Amino acid sequence: MQTAALRLRPLSLGDLLDTTFALYRQNFALLAGIVAVLTVPQTLLGILFDAIGGRIAGSLVTDLLAFLFSQLITGSLAIAISRRYLDESVTIEQAYATVGVTTFLSLLGGVILYALIVAVGFVFLIIPGIYLSIRLAFYPQGIVIERLGIFQAFARSGHLVKGTWWRVFGILIVLYLLTLFLELVAVALATKLVSAGGSGPHIVGTIISAVVAILVQPVLLTGLTLLYYDLRIRKEGFDIEHLASHMRTDGRP
């Protein structure tokens, strides 16, 4: 893997995608492990409640756990991706421990407020909703990486996107479509193993969904986090700041 000093530079769309998949491949066990730590018990509990209380009860439990766990996973992935991109070591345990209770609660509050803001924007002729969804897209990185409060993180994301909204919009569209394509391919291949009818296919389908999430979720968040750093490099010279910080740490002038 290249050192952070070589990787930290403005990225074109092609560079961003190449770096995303390189970082994903080289840290697959770490990133997939972060997702699996919570996705596996979530899936097993959903299947258990499905068997005990019926499919509706199982779905309610799974949906609630998915909402809570998704924020922990997002925060932990952002930490791990950030540290590996900056050529720093991190473990699954350290990634989760770094998030902590306060940051987790901020992520929960942030995703609820983000959803409300974007929903209100969509009520007003859709376009404001699209605009706000892009402008505020990097609030999780602000909360987790920079340790900002919810409103500070929203303002931070707006500052980073300001003046480059269309570029960010285009890159995010590509990232989301790429992730959707990977999910569809994975699900299409896996569902060939599922026979029609009965409760067995439902359980197998639930397991397949979990496996797909473990494999694909890190790709999207890696791309988003690298784009976050790309914006910081372009707007704030983060690459120079980071290099200077490491030179001071190494004792060099």
Image (cartoon, rainbow, N blue to C red):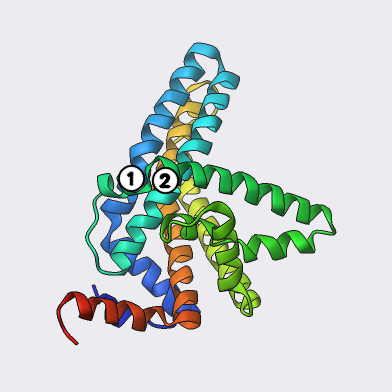
Residue with the mark numbered 1: 96
Marks 1 and 2, Cα distance to the nearest angstrom? 8 Å
* Relative to 231, residue 253 above or below: below
Residue 203 % position (x, y): 46, 27
Amino acid under label 2? Ile
Question: x, y percentage for residue 229?
Answer: 43, 72
Taking the spot 44% from the left edge, 79% from the top edge, the residue there is 233
Closer mark to the observer between disc 1 and disc 2: 1
Residue shown at 39%/46% (left/top)? 214
In-front residue for pair 186/180:
180
Residue 131 makes an appearance in the image: yes
- Residue at the far bottom in the pictured view: 253
Q: Amino acid at mark 1?
A: Tyr
Q: Residue furthest left?
A: 251
Total marks drawn? 2
Can residue 212 be seen by looking at this rendering? no
Q: Residues within 10 Å of mark 2 (few under 14, many from 20)?
A: many
Label 2 belongs to which residue? Answer: 73
Q: Is residue 250 left or right of residue 40?
A: left
Quarter of the picture containing the C terminus is bottom left
